[in-house]
Amino acid sequence: MTRREELLAEMGLAPIWRLRKRTASGPTAEQRAERQWIEIKQAVPACTACGLHKTRTQTVLGVGDENADWLLVGEAPGAEEDRLGEPFVGQAGKLLDNMLAAIGLKRGDNVYIANVLKCRPPGNRNPEPNEVAKCTPFLKQQIELIRPKLIVAMGRFAAQTLLATDATISSLRGRVYRYEGVPLIVTYHPAYLLRNLPDKAKAWADLVFAKKTMQAL
Ligand code: SF4
């Protein structure tokens, strides 16, 4: 440190060239991401882009580690999610937590969970194409911010939306796709598995496949 810098330090001041350097460098990538998370967390609860805002109790953005390697994407909030503001709660949520535990994962720990739609369709009806089209930009932004290593699309709507296809889950399973460059694997939605117990074994195989894919990345 020069004598001049020492004097400035004694006065509690930083040399002007250092201040200029800090200002000129602008926000870091982390600071930009932090700001964008704040913006999306304000934008989603205020969103009225589709008719679902009229019937929701609250929006459900997503939950978990915002720097996760694993991103799980489901369809839309159900009644419990709408009430509590968190995705995958209730019976389907418990099943999902058990499935995650079986491959050594835990909700919130290197895992982020979100839905295609952020508001509950009344009576848990299927999402309509215009609702999916209006809401997808939020999910896209989440994916850009999280930058996961692997996406697991759970259920028909998540898979068809992210892969822009009409293909069925059974025909999409067992392969690695790409969404904006991020590897993506398709499996069944836990709510579907609760109604179709024999397909649990297939979902288990999908998760093992996902884990192997992640290990190879
Ligand atoms: Fe907005 Fe999505 Fe809710 Fe529709 S479902 S009101 S697009 S947040």
Image (cartoon, rainbow, N blue to C red):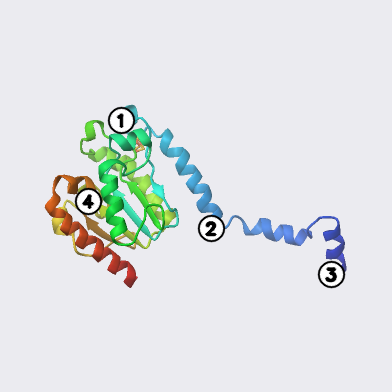
Q: Residue 29 carries which label?
A: 2
Mark found first going from the N terminus, 2 or 1: 2
Nearer to us in this view, 92 or 77: 92
Mark found first going from the N terminus, 3 or 2: 3
| Cβ at disc 1 under 8 Å from ligand 1 | yes
Q: Can residue 49 be seen in this view?
A: no
Q: Could you tell me which quadrant the N terminus lies in? A: bottom right
Is 48 on the left-hand or right-hand side of 5?
Answer: left
Q: How far apart are marks 3 and 2 (CA)?
A: 32 Å
Q: Can residue 137 be seen in this view?
A: yes
Q: Distance between the residues labelled 2 and 1?
A: 35 Å
How crowded pointer 1 is (Cα within 10 Å; few <14, some 14-19, many 20+) is rated as few
Q: Is mark 2 on a helix, strand or loop?
A: helix
Amino acid found under the numbered disc labelled 2: Ala
Query: Which residue corresponds to mark 1?
Result: 51
Give how far across and how far down residue 202 sits, in percent. Answer: 16, 59
How crowded pointer 4 is (Cα within 10 Å; few <14, some 14-19, many 20+) is rated as some
Q: How far apart are marks 1 and 4 (CA)?
A: 22 Å
Q: Could you tell me which quadrant the C terminus lies in? A: bottom left
Q: What element carries label 3?
A: loop
Is 194 situated above or below 47? below
- Residue drawn at the location 36% of the way across and 30% of the way down: 57
Query: Which residue corresponds to mark 3?
Result: 2
Query: Which residue corresponds to mark 4?
Result: 160
Q: What element carries label 1?
A: helix
How crowded pointer 3 is (Cα within 10 Å; few <14, some 14-19, many 20+) is rated as few
Q: How far apart are marks 2 and 4 (CA)?
A: 31 Å
Amino acid found under the numbered disc labelled 4: Gln
